[in-house]
Image (cartoon, rainbow, N blue to C red):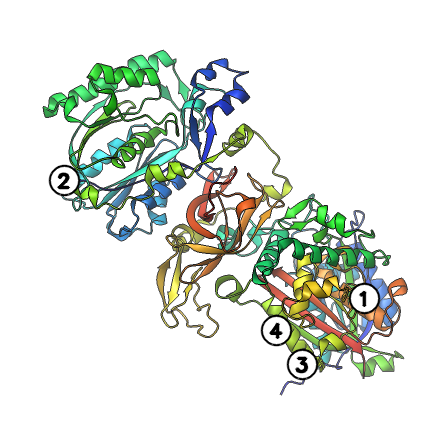
Amino acid sequence: MATGIRDKVAILGMGCSEFGERWNCGSEELMVEAFQECLTDAGIEKNEIQAAWLGSCFDEVNIGKSALPVSMTLRLPNISVTRVENYCASGTDAFRGAVYAVASGACDIALAIGVEKLKDMGYGGLPEFSSLMGVVNQLSMANMTAPGAFAMLATGYAAKYGLDIQDVRRAMAHVSVKSHANGFLNPKAHLRKIVTEEQVLNAPQIAYPLGLFDCCGVSDGAACAIVTTPEIAKSLGKKDLVSVKALQLSLSNGTELAYNWDGAHFVTTSKASTAAYKEAGIKNPRDEISMMEVHDCFSVTELVTMEDLHISERGQAPRDVMDGFYDIDGGVPCQVDGGLKCFGHPIGASGLRMLYEMYLQLHGRAGDRQLKDPKIGLTHNLGGFPFMNVCSIAIVGKYGE
Amino acid sequence: MVGITSYGGYIPRYRISRMVIAQNMAWYSPVIMAAASGEKSVANWDEDAVSIAVAAAYDCMTGRDRKALDGVSLASTTLPFADRLNAGIVAMALNMKEDGVSNADFTSCIKAGTTAAISALESIEAGSKNNVLVVASDQRRTKMATMVEMFFGDGAAALLFGKDDVIAEFKGSHSISCDFIDHYRGTGRAFDYGWEERWQRDEGYGKIIPLAISGFLEKTGMQIDDFDKVIYPCYFAGTHKEIAGKLGINKEKIQNNMHAVCGDTGTAHPFVMLVAALEEAKPGDKLLLASFGQGCDVMAFEVTDKIKDFKGPRGIKGSLANRVELASYQRFAKFRDLIVTDLGIRGEANPNTPLTVLWRKRKLLFGLIGAKCRKCGTPQIPAMPVCVNPDCCAVNEFDEYEFADREATILMFTGDMLSASIDPPAIYGLIGYDGGGRTMLDFTDCDLNQVKVGMKVRMSFRKRYFDERRGFTGYFWKAIPQSEGGDA
């Protein structure tokens, strides 16, 4: 009988580069920036790492295929390295590889690193991906972009709950206003600027009904984690350990797109969060989760995700958002570091960046945005589209609590 | 009895007022003011001679068994492929049989439609075929500020020929074939090259059509007065009238050349005008049809009692009524690729079309054919080896299931300004078909302000992309929201 991952693996150290338009950096410099911080934090030598996982999504921009870019860049000692690509869940999935390797006893110390160098394309948004989704989709799927794919969710959500689209937009605007306020406090964030609800609502339209401020930053960046067993971490003199409580993935199987979906929720997030709470021993997430970093690629994604994390009731996320429940001083602070919206979204790094914030908060090292005594943090990624996606959820907390 | 057993037509939804063209371009060529009355039909940017032919063919085959067709002929001078049977694309979109079927392109001359019709009728008379669909279409690009830009519209019409339930009996034909060149388009050239108008109308239309009709009457012993409608294309209004005068045709018997409502649709025009005549015809009416282009084909039909029971499709009348004014000349010019705009770096992606996949997935990619699970009955698209119903997951237990004829409902949608599009925003959404099955499709012929969740959509075969590097046109089905009217 599987016992789950809870408390089997501890985070020994973490690092995260500054996110943003890093015109002077390639994926190599970004990886080294995150890795050096991580290695210093872990307090070990590079040669003690026994296996590594690299998360990156768009290999055709800058970095290239395979796990060689990380092995070559960090001059790893010819250890096993695996590249993981699972859309926006790539970073968390790389972390899962390292965590599972340690939990299985296959190795003592493992590295997970995520990186994305997007600003070598020459245009805004993500790379054109019609030809990257498989050949049948290339020849038949709508002429879609990421904002368009998620924008549709807002129309589906409004229709399902009989809401005026302007009311949904207002809640979406609050999501972005809150993330901008949080990101302003974070020195590593890509976008550090306060915005108002009016500004968000009046911004140029990107994909109806999403405006510019409903969309997250497209950024360069890297983040990484070194993991080991709690026993080894203690033997290395670490105290107040942060351990992994749950790690879950859930992938679409085609029902949303081709069978029976209400168009107003994330099937995978709903399943992954249920499994993650069970694995972590969480009974009431609304009370037990101290803080979250969710996949706010678009404001509507975050809004709807609150219901699939079973923290807001179905149809009630707009009310909770407008009540400030997810604000930094709310019941479950969300995107405390600014989120994808303002910290930025270098795809392969994002899952690890979220864990980095949870790790800092749990260690009381989050500076101006430090929350009071957080115990459990949840991170969430959604790669792909509302109707066809990869969802990853990680829960971390203080070891033994 | 051999003759027409069904008809269909398609005029694109956009119409541009000729006054709008004149207001924009008469500074360059004041002579176009002379033709600045009425409006012409404009194919959307994602339409071409093949896609509008498919629309007319579906219209003609409404409620009929497409598997019973022995062949489809496509007549057009603006076909997207010089070597690849264009009629074959129409046949795949219609989900016709492949075995025992013979399809053909008739091209290089705007009378190709009537030539294809005569050939189809001869094969039926000879007994070698029973049901032949002939579709004529044209979507001609014209240079800016020219008379032909004023005259030409886009359109298609289809005629089904056979022996059973004939609504208009074929009463004979006569042809003149000669190398009279009023205009030509050299291989690889985008635009027609025309001789002066005097030559085209006085020595061309004005002489050859009367000569061919007189020849027909002489050959058959019929009189011009026997006919209730005489149908012939000629976009020169004066010449159109003069032809009637030469032949002694009463004014009310001349079929309108449709200059006011859609313009001259080239190869399609004799069929478009004939379909318009059939839409008004009563049993016993005799119709005389003539075409023009390196000669002239003349064909006679007599409408039968069966026309009373004929359930008319949308036809020319219906598609003319489905009209939206294109107020912007620039937008028209962009649709025809006459002006250069910046599609952005995102628009530079140029994936090659894998011909292997086009063949393997042709049922899906051309016919919009999915599957219905034999175990749980779930309709689904695309057809995959494992049933999409998670409670079923039957493997390889499917029957073919057509979606192209089905209505669907919008479940979610957007208008995307980021997508590289010739006509932004790119509108698309998830649709659920009546009876089950759902898919994500591009929308077309719609206005974002009018699209709503819950709105009905119909399927339309459209151009999806043009690969400029390799000259390949890709097609797929799109959804047309069924809104009333709407702004261009």
Q: Residue at x 69, y 76 (%)?
A: A100
Going from N to C along the chain, the mark reached first, 3 or 4, is 4
Q: Quadrant of residue A297?
A: bottom right
Mark 1 lies on a secondary structure that is: helix
Q: In the rendered structure, the residue with mark 2 lies on which chain?
A: B
To the question of a shared chain for discs 4 and 1, the answer is yes
The quadrant of the picture occupied by the N terminus of chain B is top left
Instruction: Tell me, for residue B97, which label it has, or none.
Output: none
Mark 2 crowd level (few <14, some 14–19, many ≥20, 10 Å Cα): some
The residue at which mark 1 appears reads as: A357
Q: Which residue is mark 3?
A: A278
Q: Residues within 10 Å of mark 3 (few under 14, many from 20)?
A: some
Placement of A279 over or under B212, stated as above or below: below
Residue B96 appears in view: yes
Of labels 4 and 1, earlier in sequence is: 4
Label 2–label 3 contact, CB within 8 A: no
| Residue furthest to the bottom | A1
Task: Check the image and report above or below for A355 versus A196.
Answer: below
Instruction: Give residue B125's mark.
Output: 2
Amino acid type, mark 2: Glu
* Residue B258 position by quadrant: top left
Instruction: Give the residue type that dot 4 points to.
Output: Lys
Mark drawn on residue A271 = 4
Mark 4 or 1: in front is 4
**Element assignment for label 4:** helix
Query: What is the secondary structure assignment of the residue under circle 3?
Result: helix
Marks 4 and 2 belong to one chain: no
